[in-house]
Image (cartoon, rainbow, N blue to C red):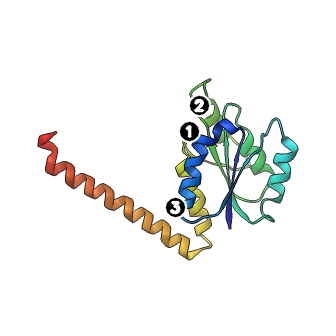
Amino acid sequence: MKVAIVMGSKSDYPVVQKAEKMLEKFGVEYETRIISAHRTPKQAEAFAEGAEANGFGCIIAAAGKAAHLAGVLAATTPLPVIGLPMKSSTMDGLDSLLSVVQMPKGVPVATVAIDGAENAALLAVQILSTADAGLRQAVKDFKKQQEEEIVALDREFNENKDSI
C-alpha cells in the first residue's frame, strides 16, 4: 500500500518534503498531489472517492489557513486521513490547526502538530504497519534507534557537562 499526500497549495511543499523523506526512509511508496478543497472541490472529492481503489492505505492532507482539505477528504473516503496543519501568516498556523482538529462527529481526522510533516509520515507508516509485519518491525527498529541516540546524548552530556 502507498500513502497519498495531498496539499492545498504548492507553497506547502517545503514542509511536505519532510513527510516524503520520512516515507522514503521506510521504503513506503507515496504520491504527492496539489488539490484544493476550495478551488478544486470536485477533484478533491473524486480523489478521495478513488483513493482506496488506487492502492492508497491512508491520506496525509496538508493545508493552511481555512484548512478544510483533511475534512473534505475524510468525508468522502473510508481511509484514515491525517491532517497536517500548515503554519500560515495569519495566526502562525493556529487557524490551520483548529480547522483540521475540529471535525464534526462521524468525520474523524487524526491531526499532528503545525508543520509536523515527519510525524504525519510516521503515523501513516504506523497505520500501514498494522497490515505489514516487515513495516511494523521497521517502526520498532526506528523507535529503538531513537532511544539509543538519546541514551548516547545523555551519557555524552553527563560526561562533559562540566566543560560546557
**Dot 2 surroundings within 10 Å: few (below 14), some, or many (20 or more)?**
some
> Is 96 or 159 nearer to us in this picture?
159
Q: CA distance from mark 3 to mark 1?
A: 22 Å
| Picture residue at 20% right of the left edge, 52% below the top | 156
Up/down of 24 relative to 84, above or below: below
Task: Residue under label 1, please give it.
Answer: 114
- Locate residue 99, reporting x and y percent: 67, 36
Secondary structure under the numbered disc 3 in the rendered image:
helix
Label drawn at residue 56: none
Task: Residue under label 2, please give it.
Answer: 94
Secondary structure under the numbered disc 1 in the rendered image:
loop
Quarter of the figure with residue 143: bottom left
- Locate residue 125, reporting x and y percent: 58, 62
Which residue, as the protein is rendered here, is positioned at the far right?
Answer: 42
Tell whether label 1 touches label 3 (CB within 8 Å). Answer: no
Q: Which one is closest to the eye, mark 3 or mark 1?
A: 3
Q: Which one is closest to the eye, mark 3 or mark 2?
A: 3
Tell whether label 2 touches label 3 (CB within 8 Å). Answer: no
Q: Amino acid at mark 1?
A: Ile
Task: Residue under label 3, please give it.
Answer: 25
| Picture residue at 60% right of the left edge, 70% below the top | 130
Q: Quadrant of the C terminus?
A: top left
| Picture residue at 26% right of the left edge, 57% below the top | 152
Tell whether label 2 touches label 1 (CB within 8 Å). Answer: yes
Secondary structure under the numbered disc 2 in the rendered image:
helix
Q: Amino acid at mark 3?
A: Lys
